[in-house]
Image (cartoon, rainbow, N blue to C red):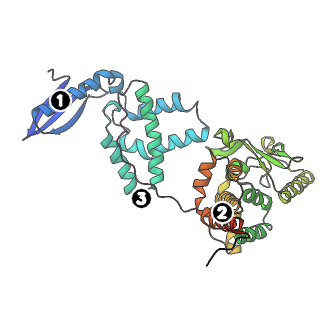
Amino acid sequence: MSRKVGQIIARGERRWLVRVYLGRNHETRIYFNRTVYGSLRNAQEYLTKQLHQRNLSRGVQGAQVTLDEFFNHWLTTAVKSKVRRSTYRNYSGMLRRYIRPAIGKVILASLVPLEIQTAYQNMIDRRLSARTVRYTHAVLRAAMRQAVRWQLLSIDPTQGVQLPRQLQREMSAFNVDQAQLFLKTALNSPFACLFAVALTSGMRPSEYLALSWPDINWQKGTASVVRTLHKVEGEWVFEEVKRKRSRRVIKLQTWVLDMLQNMKAQRRKSDQSGDSRFKELIFITTFGQPIREEHLVKKHFKPILLEAGLPNIRLYDLRHTCATLAVSLGVSPKVISEQLGHASAAFTLDTYAHVLPHMQDEAAAKMEVLLTNGISFPR
């Protein structure tokens, strides 16, 4: 067997180094090296398997490309034109922070699961969350599957990699009394109307921060959720909602509509100047600019919680509060699912299952009254 293609080198008793030539990069020859334990026959079978994979698709093109070079090409040609700008930024950022420093210089064709597993373990050792590791894995897996489709790899090297278990995050939400206290305290805030919409509509922050006046149907009392707002690399970007189910119409409560109408009337009187791109936005700063979620949380939301003595929840948890209160009041899961833009009512029920036990008690009590009304049971 040609040494240029593959070699088996004895490294001790029943230990063999299997080498497969992959090609050259810009500086030197590239080999796939693995230690195999057992008989010489075991080593020969392993070498045959690796040579077969090499002949299938690990050709010169794959052998000459580093992961960094492949990521650049993948992001530009297969990702950038197909996803939202915020998603592209997230993909690029995950690779830049966690994958490129660890294995970016590795030749694509020689990448093996152990190297990926080691990169993930380094993330865990740095006390990064399981969610971050799993998201990074999802990005890397998408890239490797594309490499297989482009026939640069014969198999996906992310297969078989073990991921940390992601613990279910305990959901935070206000109860009825806390929600009322929050609203009462928020009325003193310049963003009282924003917080009212956030608490009662179940929208995500990126959705209600992107609301514009044409999205409000005053006759029907509804708001249409059709876009999100993000700041990407210092620039405000409007994007369509990510999923089809996220595009929805939400019924607004009457008092919230009244607050919106009053705010719109005051806006007309003030004749506020600002960037013409944002003149139709409902929620803006005093300078006519979109509101940064981070600024809203730090300067307004957290101080309201502190003043009211409420739990230190996230701004996003106002969405959970809206859903939790609706479930506890017996609103149909399908209706709640449509309001939140969930994929299905089953997902909604699974997400807010913690609210259901006391509802089952109430349902059992009502059923008992229905069935036993007028019936005397022996004691």
The earlier-in-sequence mark between 1 and 3 is 1
Distance, label 1 to label 2, CA atoms, is 62 Å
Distance, label 2 to label 3, CA atoms, is 25 Å
Image spot of residue 185 (x, y percent): 76, 70
Q: Amino acid at mark 2?
A: Lys
By secondary structure, the bulk of the magenta-drawn segment is best described as: loop
**Nearest to viewer (mark 1 / mark 2):** 1
Which label is found at residue 298?
A: 2
Magenta region:
152-170
Say if residue 95 shows up in the picture.
Answer: no
Pointer 1 residue? 45
The earlier-in-sequence mark between 1 and 2 is 1
16 relative to 262, above or below: above
At 43% across and 32% down in the image, what residue appears?
Answer: 145
Q: Amino acid at mark 3?
A: Arg
Pointer 3 residue? 127
Q: Amino acid at mark 1?
A: Glu
